[in-house]
Image (cartoon, rainbow, N blue to C red):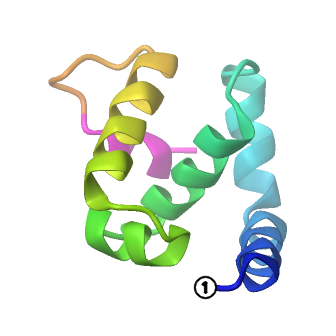
C-alpha cells in the first residue's frame, strides 16, 4: 500500500474507534500510537495475517507487537487479548 493510502486508512480507523481509544487511554495512558492502532485492529477480531496485509508488515512483526501490547496492558498469558480489548 502507498504510504498516503495507509495513513488515510489509519485515520479512518481511529475516527471510527475514538470512543474505544478514549476509554483505553484512560485505563492505559502510556500506550504508543502503534499499540493503540494494533488494539483497534485486534478489537474487530482481525487475524495476524489480515493485520499484516493492512499494515504492510510480516506476521512475525505483528506477533511481536501483540506480545508488547499484552505487556503494556499488564495481561497474563492466560488472559485473552482480543476479549480484553472488546470489553472496552
**Residue reaching furthest left?**
78
- Which part of the image, by quadrant, shows the C terminus? top right
Circle 1 is placed at which residue position?
1
- Which part of the image, by quadrant, shows the N terminus? bottom right
Seen in the picture, residue 43 relative to 64 is either above or below; the reply is below
SS for dot 1: loop
Q: Position of residue 72 (x, y in %)?
A: 51, 19
Residue span colored magenta: 80-88
**In the displayed structure, does residue 13 sit left or right of residue 41?**
right
Which one is nearer the viewer's eye here, 31 or 23? 31
Q: Position of residue 10 (x, y in %)?
A: 73, 69
**Residue reaching furthest front?**
2
Q: Quadrant of residue 70?
A: top left
Seen in the picture, residue 37 relative to 53 is either above or below; the reply is above
Q: Residue at x 26, y 50 (%)?
A: 60
**In the displayed structure, does residue 2 sit left or right of residue 66?**
right
Q: Residue at x 67, y 27 (%)?
A: 31
Q: Residue at x 70, y 85 (%)?
A: 2
Which one is nearer the viewer's eye here, 60 or 81? 60
Q: Quadrant of residue 58?
A: bottom left
Seen in the picture, residue 69 relative to 62 is either above or below; the reply is above
How many numbered marks have been drawn onto this rendered protein structure?
1
Q: Position of residue 53 (x, y in %)?
A: 41, 77
Seen in the picture, residue 41 relative to 25 is either above or below; the reply is below
Chief secondary structure of the magenta span? helix
Q: Position of residue 11 (x, y in %)?
A: 83, 70
Q: Is residue 65 magenta?
A: no
Amino acid at each position: 500500500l502507498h504510504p498516503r493510502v495507509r495513513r488515510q486508512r489509519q485515520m479512518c480507523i481511529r475516527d471510527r474507534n475514538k470512543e474505544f481509544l478514549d476509554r483505553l487511554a484512560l485505563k492505559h495512558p502510556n500506550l504508543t500510537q502503534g499499540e493503540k492502532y494494533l488494539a483497534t485492529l485486534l478489537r474487530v477480531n482481525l487475524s495476524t495475517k489480515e493485520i499484516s496485509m493492512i499494515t504492510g508488515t510480516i506476521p512475525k512483526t505483528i506477533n511481536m507487537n501483540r506480545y508488547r501490547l499484552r505487556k503494556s496492558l499488564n495481561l497474563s498469558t492466560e488472559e485473552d487479548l482480543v476479549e480484553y480489548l472488546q470489553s472496552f
